[in-house]
Image (tube, rainbow, N blue to C red):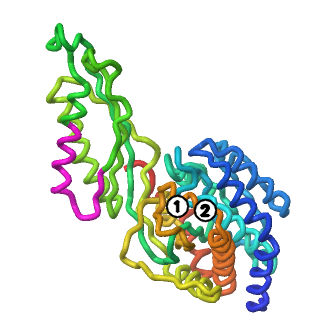
Amino acid sequence: MTDIPTARKTVTGAVRNWREPVVALSHALHDDPETALQEHRAAARIADLMESAGFTVTRGAGDLPTAVLATYGTGDLVMAFCAEYDALPGIGHACGHNVNGAASVGAALGLAAVADELGVTVKLIGTPAEEDIGGKVLLMDAGIFDDVAAAMMVHAAPDDTVGASSLAIGAWDLAYRGRPSHAALAPWEGVNALDAMTVAQTAVGLLRQQLRPGVVVHGIVTDGGQAVNVIPARTAARYEVRARTVEQLAEAWHRVRACFEAGAHATGAELEVSAHGRDFADLRQDEEMTRSYARAAAELGRTVTSLHGETMASTDMGNVSQRIPSIHPTVGYDTGGAKQHTPEFTAHGKTPGADLAVLDGATALALVGVDLATSGVQRARLLDGVRKRRANASWPGGRI
C-alpha cells in the first residue's frame, strides 16, 4: 500500500531539489521573450532540462516546431502538466508565461519522483502560441492529449485563486477590397475600402448595446490604405469576440460578421473573412482537483480565493478542460498593482515573489497528482474518463 505522507514529502523535496534550474528557467524565459510560434529557444531550454532529468523528450511535438513533449514513467494513469512560454509582442512576458511554464516543469519533475511508486505516467506538454492561435487545441487535434487522464497548470497573477471560468474567444482576419482612384480628381471612380471599415466599426459600436452580458468585441485596423491622396483599395483588421460559452460566441460572431457585411454592402467593397487560429472554449475546472490544489496551496502558506461563477479572460486551456478533467488556478505574487498584459506586470516577472510562485505552484500541482493517484475513487474516475473518450472521439472544441 502506498505511503501517502511519504509520497507527498518526496514530491515536495523533489521540487525543492530542482529549485535552482527551475527558477533559472523562469528567468531565462523572462529575459529572452519569444512570441507565438517563434519560441524556439524557450522550447529548447525546456527540452534540455527535461532530458537531463531522464524524461523521454520529443521536440516539435504534434508537428508544431516549438511544441515539446516530455514523458516519464509507465503507469496507466497519465497526468499532464501544460507549460506555456510564449510572450506578447512588444511587452515581453506581460502575462507571466515564464512563471506558468517553469511551474509546470517543476511540477512534472516533482511528480516524476514518485511516478513508478504511484503507477503514474507524467507528461510535460510544452504548448506554444497560447496568446495567438491556440497551441493546446492544435496539440489536441494531433493526439498529444489522447491518453491524458488529468491536465493541470497554474497561471501567474496578482492573487491566488481557484475555480474561475474563462470567456470563450474567437479571432478573425477581415479585409475589404475596393478600387483605387485619385482622391481629388476622380474620387467617384473609386470604391473606398476604408469607408467600408468605418461603416463596419460604427455598426459594431452600435451593436454593443444589444449584446448579452459577458460578450466583448475588440479589434485593431492593421491596414488603412497606402497614400492619403489615393482612395484606399484595401483595408484590413483583426477582431476578437469573447462570450461566456461557445454557444454564445457563435451567436455573437454571427451578429458581428453582419456588421462587416454591412460595410461591404454600403460601399461596394468586397469582404474577405478568415479565421485566425482556433476558437478557445470556456474553462471548466474540475471540482475535486480544485479542492486538492486549494488544500495544497494552503499548506504552503498561501491564501487562496475561490472564484466559482466568475470569469477570467480567455485561454486555450478551456478546450482541454471540456474534454479532460483540468485545473487552471492562478498563483499570485506582488506586481505593484499591475494587471496582466502591461509592461508593469512584465517588470515583476522574476522577483523573489515570482520565483516563490513558480516553486509553490509546482509543488501544489504535483501534490494534486499524488492525491489523484492515491485515491481509489479518483483514479477510477479518471481512468474511466479516458476509456469513454476513446469510445467517443468527438469533443466541443475547434472552430465554431
Label 2 is placed on what type of residue? Gly
Give residue 168's position: percent from left, percent from top: 38, 59
From what the image shows, is residue 375 above or below residue 217? below
The residue that mark 2 highlights is 349
Give residue 265's position: percent from left, percent from top: 16, 29
Along the horizontal axis of the image, is 225 left or right of 305?
Answer: left
Crowding near the residue tagged with mark 1, few <14, some 14–19, many ≥20 C-alpha atoms within 10 Å: many
From what the image shows, is residue 61 above or below residue 309? above
Q: Are marks 1 and 2 in contact (CB under 8 Å)?
A: yes
From what the image shows, is residue 373 above or below residue 44? below
**In the depicted view, which residue is nearer to us: 106 or 62?**
106
Task: Name the residue: 41% across, 62% down.
Answer: 313
**Is-magenta flag for residue 139?**
no
Q: Would residue 325 be visible to someone looking at this image?
A: no
**In the depicted view, which residue is nearer to us: 183 or 72?**
183
Along the horizontal axis of the image, is 364 left or right of 121?
Answer: left
**In the depicted view, which residue is nearer to us: 96 or 142?**
96
Give the dominant element type of the magenta stretch: helix, strand or loop. Answer: helix
**Is-magenta flag for residue 204?**
yes
User: How far, Cα to Cα, is label 1 from label 2?
Assistant: 7 Å
Give residue 345's position: percent from left, percent from top: 52, 61
Along the horizontal axis of the image, is 103 left or right of 310?
Answer: right
Q: Which residues are magenta?
A: 200-217
The residue that mark 1 highlights is 345
Label 1 is placed on what type of residue? Phe
Along the horizontal axis of the image, is 251 left or right of 64?
Answer: left
**In the depicted view, which residue is nearer to us: 226 or 143?**
226
